[in-house]
Image (cartoon, rainbow, N blue to C red):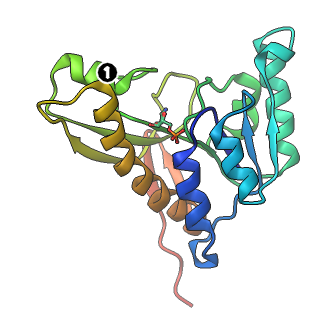
Amino acid sequence: MVLVSGSGTNLQALIDASADPAYGARIVAVGADRDGIEGLARAERAGITTFVDRVADHPDRAAWDASLAETVAAHAPDLVVLAGFMKLAGPAFLARFGGRTVNTHPALSPAFPGMHGPRDALEYGVKVTGATLFVVDAGVDTGPIVAQVAVPVAEDDDAASLHERIKTHERAMLVEWVGRLAREPWTIDGRRIRFHPKEQS
Ligand code: GRF
């Protein structure tokens, strides 16, 4: 299950990877918090079931959160991937899918959490930034880290060019590690993700 809010290039990378059965993960559905986005169109073109659950269609955030959790649960996903999903997972969602929901963030956590990772990194003047795949918790981009990739900042970067460079690496990281999360047993030990090699038979 993948949740999106925007252009869906990370989703597309997962759609392309999962075309190979050896990848080990299949996208059971794609959900969004808004209509008319390219992310949903990408899913539809790939023949994947989609749904939209908008905050504005509920009396409050808590009702939306509970509804999203229900809708996602109806598709019985093993893993939920937030790929450019611009909403925080709420308590009802985390009660059901905490520990098996991952999100990707375009910065090297714990630096520059929030909506403007590339811009904030640029303004701070760092020379290296990147992307982080993490298990979602109740904080903003704070959960246990699955993987990170470093990306250099160029002298003439603006926020858009830096974000585009990060996204190229972010997609590759997402595909590699979502595949591992799907294929290999793993546990969360404090803040550390541990993969457990399968027993040889
Ligand atoms: C990604 O950089 C993601 O980390 C950030 O928004 C971007 C989404 O891109 N939150 P896309 O919709 O997958 O193209």
Q: How many labels does the image show?
A: 1
Q: x, y (%) of residue 21?
A: 64, 77
In the displayed structure, does residue 188 sit left or right of residue 63? left
**Res 88 seen here:** yes
Q: Residue at x 49, y 59 (%)?
A: 175
Q: Which residue is drawn at 86% across and 8% down?
A: 59
In the displayed structure, does residue 159 sit left or right of residue 125? right
Q: Farthest top residue?
A: 59
**Res 111 seen here:** no
- Closer to us: 49 or 132: 49
Quadrant of the image containing the C terminus: bottom right
Say what secondary structure mark 1 lies in: helix
The part of the image, by quadrant, that contains residue 121 is top left
Q: x, y (%) of residue 163?
A: 35, 34
Q: x, y (%) of residue 27?
A: 70, 58
Q: Which residue is drawn at 77% across and 17% down?
A: 55
In the displayed structure, does residue 88 sit left or right of residue 130? right
Residue at which label 1 appears: 119
Q: Residues within 10 Å of mark 1 (few under 14, many from 20)?
A: some
The part of the image, by quadrant, that contains residue 153 is top left
For disc 1, does the CB lie below 8 Å from ligand 1? no
Q: Which amino acid does label 1 sit on?
A: Arg
Q: Residue at x 78, y 59 (%)?
A: 47
- Closer to us: 72 or 35: 35
Q: Give the vertical position of 111 relative to 192 (above or below).
A: above
Q: Give the vertical position of 77 relative to 129 (above or below).
A: below
